[in-house]
Image (cartoon, grey):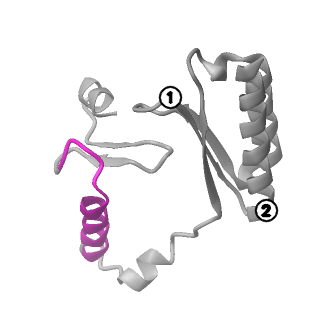
Amino acid sequence: MMETMRQQHLNIGGEPSGHLILGDHSTTGDALIAALQVLAALRHEKIPASRGTSLFKPVPQILKNVKFAGGDPLARADVAKHIRAIETQLGSSGRIVVRPSGTEPLLRIMIEGEDHAAITDMADALANTITQSIAA
């Protein structure tokens, strides 16, 4: 992410997984720095923290890792089709991010949505599809 920020002359960068880099302060994601900057912005705008934090509405989130030995599971048609089906099912009330880990032979599945049980089922079913696809 930092390389893209440098190439595009950006000061703030973020990933769907939640990593956030504030280029004026660090070259890596740092939640403490991000939190302090949010508080500084609230103070600058004279917004009480109690009101500023009420702007954030958390939704249930499921994180699941699926091991794979090699190749690109995301390039498999059945996996891509399943991901699109989940995107359609979530609509505007949630989101899905599926990405390879940068450090391990894992696919990371993150699904957010209003119904915890439903997104858990979605993540489990997708993990199963991926596992079956790479075993074939």
Q: Main secondary structure of the magenta part?
A: helix
Q: Quadrant of residue 68?
A: top right
Of callouts 2 and 1, the N-terminal one:
1
Q: Nearer the viewer, mark 2 or mark 1?
A: 1
The type of residue carrying mark 1 is Pro
**Mark pair 2, 1: CA separation:** 27 Å
Up-down relation of residue 23 to residue 129 (above or below): below
- Residue in view at x 72 percent, y 46 percent: 123
- Residue in view at x 45 percent, y 76 percent: 53
Q: Position of residue 30 (x, y in %)?
A: 28, 54
Toward the viewer: 106 or 24? Answer: 106
**48 sits left or right of 55 in the view:** left
Q: Quadrant of residue 96?
A: top right
| SS label for mark 1 | loop
Label 2–label 1 contact, CB within 8 A: no
Q: Position of residue 11 (x, y in %)?
A: 25, 42
Is 40 covered by the magenta stretch?
A: yes
Q: Is residue 99 visible?
A: yes
Up-down relation of residue 38 to residue 96 (above or below): below
**101 sits left or right of 28 in the view:** right
The type of residue carrying mark 2 is Ala
Mark drawn on residue 105: 1
Magenta residues, start to end: 26-43
User: Which quadrant: the C terminus?
Assistant: top right
| SS label for mark 2 | helix
Q: Which residue is mark 2?
A: 117
Up-down relation of residue 89 to residue 58 (above or below): above
Toward the viewer: 33 or 78? Answer: 78
- Residue in view at x 50 percent, y 78 percent: 54
Q: Quadrant of residue 5?
A: top left
